[in-house]
């Protein structure tokens, strides 16, 4: 029996082609920010630089602090002054990126069943602000209250696949990883949690395996396979 179950979001609870989503996301942001003096090519390049900074975060600062520190190296105080504009983007234009994602009603079915028995944590890679993460939760047909904790760039100090990211969650809730289950679609970013003692399940509907790791050792399959796996552990 597990004490806590952790879920990834993008490609797991929210069906997604990462390349298609990223293209839509950047296109919408570039269009929104063009009227505020941001050239599309520079903007996208500097968002990637900020994202890389978060991925390399050693845990000493929040991902939010790291992102804006890197982003402002190019734009200076202007970027800080325009934070409300970026926030407005996530409230409005960003919502159009929903059309680049899929929808699987099984996500809600699984979450609704499991939240009756287990505390659930949404362990999504925290490279987005809370407002964007909460939007994507809604796109998946879910509610933020389904989860006891949701990782965002405001409350996290590292990113997947850095083990610091998972260790922070362990420390925050005093978890025993051997009694936790991490579920995700990325053979590297999600399954790496096994190194800290987590049980893992690889959801293969939108499998990502960019490093071609051997996934045969992981419990894996569809949402139905996931429920069967969990039920087997409960017997």
Image: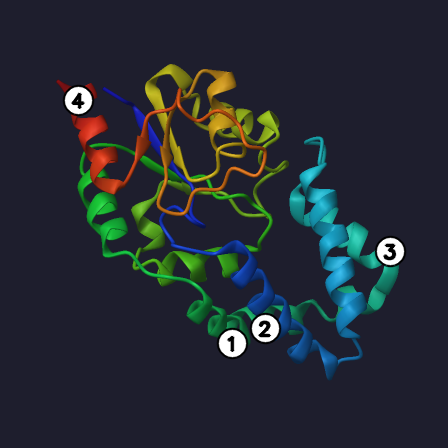
Q: Position of residue 184 (x, y in %)?
A: 41, 38
Q: Nearer the viewer, mark 2 or mark 4?
A: 4
The residue at 68%/74% (across/down) is 30
Residue drawn at x 47%, y 28% is 191
Q: What residue sits 35% from the left and 46% below the top?
A: 205
Instruction: Name the mark on residue 92.
Output: 1
User: How far apart, in angstroms, are the residues tagged by discs 1 and 3?
Assistant: 27 Å
On the image, numbered disc 4 is attached to which residue?
232
Q: Is residue 221 left or right of residue 45?
A: left
Tally of numbered tags: 4
The mark nearer the N terminus, 2 or 3, is 3
- Report x, y in % for residue 79: 78, 66
Classify mark 1: helix, strand or loop: loop
- Decide: marks 1, 2 in contact (CB < 8 A)? yes
**Comes first in the chain, label 2 or label 4:** 2
Decide which of 134, 50 is in the foreground and name it: 50
Residue at mark 3 to residue at mark 4: CA–CA distance:
52 Å
Disc assigned to residue 73: 3
- Camera-nearest residue between 31 and 35: 31
Mark positioned earlier in the residue sequence (1 or 3): 3
Position above or below: 157 against 78: above
Q: Quadrant of the C terminus?
A: top left
Residue 88 pos. (x, y %): 58, 74
- Sequence-wise, the earlier of marks 1 and 4 is 1
The mark nearer the N terminus, 3 or 4, is 3
Badge 4 element: helix
Element under disc 2: helix
Name the residue that disc number 2 marks: 89
């Amino acid at each position: 029996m597990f004490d806590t179950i952790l879920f990834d979001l993008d490609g797991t609870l929210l069906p997604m082609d990462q390349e298609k989503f990223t293209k839509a996301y950047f296109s919408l942001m570039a269009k929104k920010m063009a009227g505020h003096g941001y050239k599309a090519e520079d903007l996208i390049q500097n968002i990637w630089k900020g994202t890389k900074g978060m991925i390399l975060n050693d845990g000493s600062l929040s991902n939010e602090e790291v992102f804006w520190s890197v982003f402002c190296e190019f734009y200076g105080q202007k970027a800080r002054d325009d934070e409300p504009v970026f926030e407005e983007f996530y409230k409005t234009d960003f919502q159009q990126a929903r059309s680049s994602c899929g929808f699987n009603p099984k996500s809600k079915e699984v979450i609704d069943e499991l939240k009756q028995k287990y505390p659930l944590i949404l362990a999504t890679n925290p490279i987005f602000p809370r407002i964007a993460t909460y939007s994507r939760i809604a796109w998946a047909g879910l509610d933020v209250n389904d989860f006891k904790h949701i990782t965002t760039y405001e409350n996290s100090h590292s990113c997947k696949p850095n083990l610091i990211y998972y260790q922070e969650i362990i420390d925050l809730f005093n978890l025993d990883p051997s009694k936790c289950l991490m579920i995700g679609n990325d053979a590297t970013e999600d399954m790496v949690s096994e190194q800290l003692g987590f049980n893992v399940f690889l959801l293969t509907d939108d499998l990502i395996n960019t490093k071609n790791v051997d996934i045969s050792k992981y419990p894996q399959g569809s949402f139905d396979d996931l429920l069967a796996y969990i039920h087997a552990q409960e017997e």
